[in-house]
Every structure is written in C-alpha cells, then in structure tokens.
Image: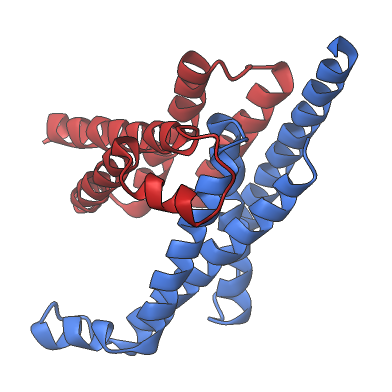
Chain colours: A red, B blue
Amino acid sequence: MTILIILLWLANLCCDTIGQIAFKYAAISSHNRIDFDYWRILLFNRWLWLGITSYAIGFLLWIAFLSYIPLSQAILLGSANIITIMIFGHILFKEKLTFFRVLGVGLITAGVIIVGIG
Amino acid sequence: MKKYYPIGFLFLLFFDTLGQTGFKFSANYAEPVNYSFAWVMRILTNKWIYMTCISYLGAFLTWMILLKKVPVGPAFAASRLQIITVMFVSHYIFNEPPKLNHILGAIVILCGVFFLALAEKKLAKNKEQID
C-alpha cells in the first residue's frame, strides 16, 4: 500500500513537472506577436498537447492519491512540484537560481504546506 | 522586471479564483453528492460550471502569454498566490473563516512572493549594468 502511494505521488509529481515544462516550450516555440495566428499555430503545437495530456493524467493520479491519504498530507507532498518545476526550469531553460529566487520559492512552498496542515 | 508582468499575474489570479469559486458554487448547487447520473447532470446544467470553464480558459491563455517571457520556476511558485485569494472568497462568500495556520501560511507565501519580486528587480538591475 505504501509503495503504491509513493508511486502515485511520484507519478503525479512527474506529470505536474512535465506539464509546466511542456507549456513553457509551447509558449516560447514562436516569437510571433500575440494575435489570432499565434493562437492558431499554438493549437497544433505538440508541446502544448503534451502539457495538456500530462495535466489530464496528473489530475486522475491526484484523485487516486487523495483516496489513499488525507488532503492535508496530500497537499504537503503535492507542493513538491513547486521545487521540481524550479529545478527543471533551471536545467532546461537556464533560469538563474539566485539567492532571492530560491528563498522566495522556498518560502512559498513552506507557506503552502502551512496552509495545508489541519 | 517588465511593467506588464504584475498585470498578467493579476489576471491569472482573477481567473483562477473565479474558477475555484465557480467549482464551489457548482458543488453546492449539485448537492447531495451521490455519484449518480442525476448528480452529474446537476453539475453540467448549472451556470456556475460554465463560469469555471470560461475562467480556466482565461487563466490558461494568460499563463501561456506570461510564459513567453517569465521564467516558469518562479512564476509557478508565484501563482500559488491564488491560495490567498481563494481564502478571501471562502471567508466572504462561503462563510468559511480562515484558521490561524491559514493566515500564517498566507503571510509566509506573501513573503515568498516579495522575495521573488526582489529577485527580479535585482536581475533586471544587473542586466542593465551589463548592457
């Protein structure tokens, strides 16, 4: 049972991270100004659909995850996506991890966990 | 930091919050929860669920515009501000007063967003000096 919960959590974390990374790739795939054509091209972008698929699977995994553990604990584990998205943003898009950025992201994660308790 | 980032985030927060509010209204409207066909139909036939759909579409488009420029890591973290706005809606519309830990968590999140904004300011300043 515990292994199943951990696997569900990790799979959900992967889906959230892949989803956001894919959305970022989709958003920067064209340098066009934002007009009707931009959205039309974006609609057929494979990154966009990877992101949407990823989120859809993540949603189902989250529901499954919630059926095993209480919401407060789920939020505590679920907020790890804030950290993983920052790390992959750094690796893939060369987003600088300055001291203040890491501090800010850390505080937000802590805040989400505090709200989630009880 | 570009001037329009905060405006984009405000739009994102607005849509996210409106979406969640719509979910709650729909859930209340569709009660009792019995996972029956009738329950699903009650969800699909009330106006609130469509407000949610439109809000989430708006949030998605706003997010895609923001992501063209902003770094996804800090921006995703900053978008957790919706927890605070939803807290306000819960309190004033649904009469769910926040508990002590909710208020405490909200303050910590706000501090985090403050430092993210500070980080952007510093990065912009460094870039200016290089240019």
Quarter holding residue B67: top right
B17 or A113: which is nearer to us? B17
| Image coordinates for residue B98, horizontal then vertical, percent | 60, 66
Residue B10 position within the rendered picture, expressed as x and y whole percent measured from the top left: 67, 58
**Vertical placement of residue B47 versus A96, above or below:** below
- Residue pictured at 69% horizontal, 37% vertical: B112
Question: Can residue A118 be seen at all in this image of the molecule?
Answer: no
Q: Nearer the viewer, residue A85 or A77?
A: A85
Q: Looking at the picture, how far across and down is residue B49, in whole percent?
A: 36, 79
The residue lying furthest to the top in this view is B130
- Residue placed at 21% from the left, 45% from the top? A57
Nearer to us in this view, B38 or B44: B44
Residue B80 visible, this angle: yes
Image: B8 above or below B15: above
Residue at screen point 49% across, 55% down: B61
Q: Quadrant of the N terminus of chain A?
A: top left
When asked about the image quadrant of residue A20, the answer is: top left
Can you name the residue that lies furthest to the front here?
Answer: A37
Position of B33 relative to A77 (above/below): below
Quadrant in the picture for residue A2: top left
Residue at 26% x, 82% y: name it. Answer: B43
